[in-house]
Amino acid sequence: MPLTGFLFPGQGSQQAGMGRELLEDAELAELAERCGAEAGIDLRHLLVEADDEELTLTQNAQPALVFTGVALVRLLARRGIEATAAAGHSVGEYSALAALGALAPEQAVKTVVERGRAMAAASPPGQSSMIAVLGIGPEPIAEALTGMDGIWPANYNTPTQTVVGGTVAALEEATPRLLEAGARRVLPLRVAAAFHTPLVAAAGARLRLTLDALEWTLPRAPVVANVDAEAYQDATLIAARLEQQLSSPVRWSDCVRRLADLGCENFIEVGPKRALSGMIRELLPGRQASSVGTPSAVASQQSVQSDESAAGRLLQ
């Protein structure tokens, strides 16, 4: 069986009804009840009944995504599919850590509810936002932003996709500069603030109080951190790196390459949609990537894995 890297998506991958099929499983339904009670939220409602508008709220999207990632990994494990290593994009890093045993799921859901509230409070609505810059690399983007205040790269997703965050005024000024620098498109994102920039540093300081109170252990497989694309090797440093993550850029392209360095040959995006698996073609040409967002998709993944294993035995 190929060595597999798990990829956990961040905010933006949530969708209405994302947990409906998951909660038909009695064990997962019970886990959702425990997680919701610990966090003081109606998690079942978010997973089954909430519409896309309600799930867009940061404090709703994050617990729904983290629980979904944890639940899907449990289903994958029942079928013998385990991660060689993992990484998560932004809040997806919490999914990765919780799914691989660094933190109890109940505590992870409670923590990202607080993370969402801290992020929402850090920057008043309408003052900052983010844009996706497509078609050029980080270097020409940095050159285009030279001399500007209130704007920073926030997500290094692929060599031709970078997300930039900043004040609304700075983003408006930057857009024509980026197009002149060769960007194919500059797309405004529907987000509440400039996450992963210094504008939300206050959220990290508030969140650190929660992070320091948790009982962290090293995950059972390496989890690569957003801030430096290195795997966690000391559980006592997890809280500090997650605090730093809030106001630092997500170095996603480096994270994926680190997973390849750790031996991952095949990638599974664990969560709704295909935001991360779709980037593998550009980041690691020739590597296989798929996504699982429901129990049905997990069952299909098992069939694919079994077929690949059988083919491998025939070729040996």
Image: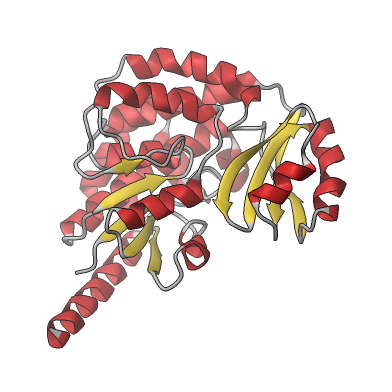
Identified at 22% across, 45% down, the residue is 221
Q: Nearer the viewer, residue 89 or 52?
A: 89
Image quadrant where one finds the N terminus? bottom left
x%, y% of residue 42?
42, 32
Identified at 31% across, 52% down, the residue is 72
User: Where, by quadrant of the figure, is residue 117 drawn?
Assistant: top right
Identified at 48% across, 56% down, the residue is 276
**Relative horizontal placement of residue 104, taking residue 230 as reference (left or right):** left
Given the current orientation, which residue lies at the most extreme bottom position? 314
x%, y% of residue 251?
50, 43
Q: 81 above or below 221? A: below
x%, y% of residue 246?
52, 28
**Relative horizontal placement of residue 148, taking residue 272 as reference (left or right):** right
Q: 50 above or below 25? A: above
Q: 200 above or below 66? A: above
x%, y% of residue 259?
34, 53
**Relative horizontal placement of residue 84, taking residue 49 as reference (left or right):** left
User: Where, by quadrant of the figure, is residue 88 drawn?
Assistant: top left
Instruction: Count every numbered label the image shows and give the total.
Output: 0
Q: 128 above or below 263? A: above
**Is residue 169 at all visible to an observer of this figure?**
yes
Image quadrant where one finds the C terminus? bottom left
